[in-house]
Image (cartoon, rainbow, N blue to C red):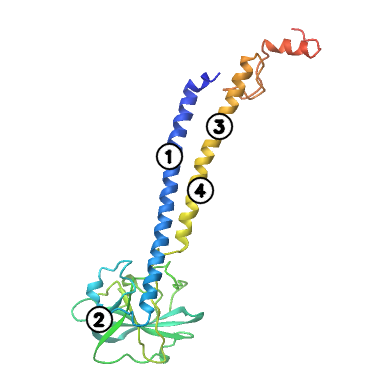
Amino acid sequence: MYRFLLTPRWWAINVFVLLSIPFCLFMGSWQLGRFEDRVDTHQVRQERSEARSGAGARSAARPLEELLPLTEETVGERARATGRYDTDQEFLVPGRRIEDREGFYVLTMLRTGDGPALPVVRGWLPGAADPARVPAPPGGEVTVTGAVQAPETQGSRGVSVGGALPAGQLGIISAATLVNMVPYEVRDVWITVERPREPMAAVPPVAPAGAGLDLKAFQNLGYTAQWFVFAGFVVFMWYRLFRREAESAHDLALGLPPEPGTEPGTGGDSAPGPGDEALVRLDGRTPPGP
């Protein structure tokens, strides 16, 4: 009765199912692993942030060069850099919020010698971006201490890209943005000063994009469920096709005609079979003439 499983059509169906199910399970497991990695990264970053903010637990600032190239582990570490502020290269970064208050960052370039200049966010002020409210940077050689940050992108937290900005303002803090605005090479990292001049407030360090429990993490979780559902759907459809074929084969073995459109390989009513006349006589009706 199950000899239909040996037909070329069912060989193709079975091979497809045997390949699809492991593939769906593998992809679902991979997406689940990606989600778990992001959860672990989020927990590690939280523990590290709590350790940094704890009393007496703050680590000593390290030279910036020791933290480069920047990684997820070194983002937010305390760094120090020595140089002179370039007062001619100061920018305001509008649309930045701290504790539900909107304001702007004050970014000044720090010349650190013969190497690339370092973007330094000296602090945050509430309200609209206004250079008249910004206190002047200290003159002479200074040592800046603060949290080192990864370059921003359009998807970074707090970044709002909408239209052209006035002269002297910056939308995204990155070397790719600053390279066309300053006449020298720029490091692709930036530092937030931990003790800014009043009335500016310190800018808290921001986790790098793509780390922790962001939208991408929950997308990974959704894809996990999707791949497992695909695997279950493949099994369900195989069982449904198998059951229909098995019922058709069983009916044919008993001499019963297949229902219209259900015979394998046909798409409509089948011709009357030899069992039709017997069925009509059992029903008490006279079979139609030729």
User: Which SS class for mark 2?
Assistant: strand
Image spot of residue 285 (x, y percent): 81, 12
User: Which SS class for mark 3?
Assistant: helix
Which of the 4 image quarters holds residue 260? top right
> CA–CA distance between discs 1 and 2?
53 Å
Image spot of residue 166 (x, y percent): 42, 80
Residue 281 shows up from this direction: yes
> CA–CA distance between discs 1 and 3?
17 Å
User: Which SS class for mark 4?
Assistant: helix
> CA–CA distance between discs 1 and 4?
14 Å
Residue 209 shows up from this direction: no
Q: Earlier in the sequence, mark 2 or mark 4?
A: 2
Image spot of residue 289 (x, y percent): 77, 7
> CA–CA distance between discs 3 and 4?
20 Å
Q: Earlier in the sequence, mark 3 or mark 4?
A: 4
Is label 1 in contact with label 4 (beta carbons under 8 Å)? no
On residue 22, the disc is 1
- Please tell me whether residue 165 is drawn above or below residue 286 in the rendered image: below
Residue highlighted by disc 4: 226
Residue 281 in the figure: left or right of residue 127: right
Quadrant, the N terminus: top right
Q: Earlier in the sequence, mark 1 or mark 3?
A: 1
> CA–CA distance between discs 2 and 4?
48 Å
Q: Nearer the viewer, mark 1 or mark 2?
A: 1
Q: Nearer the viewer, mark 3 or mark 4?
A: 3
Compare residues 170 and 46 and report the one nearer the observer: 46
Q: Nearer the viewer, mark 1 or mark 4?
A: 1
Residue highlighted by disc 2: 81
Q: Amino acid at mark 4?
A: Gln
Residue highlighted by disc 3: 239
Is label 1 in contact with label 2 (beta carbons under 8 Å)? no
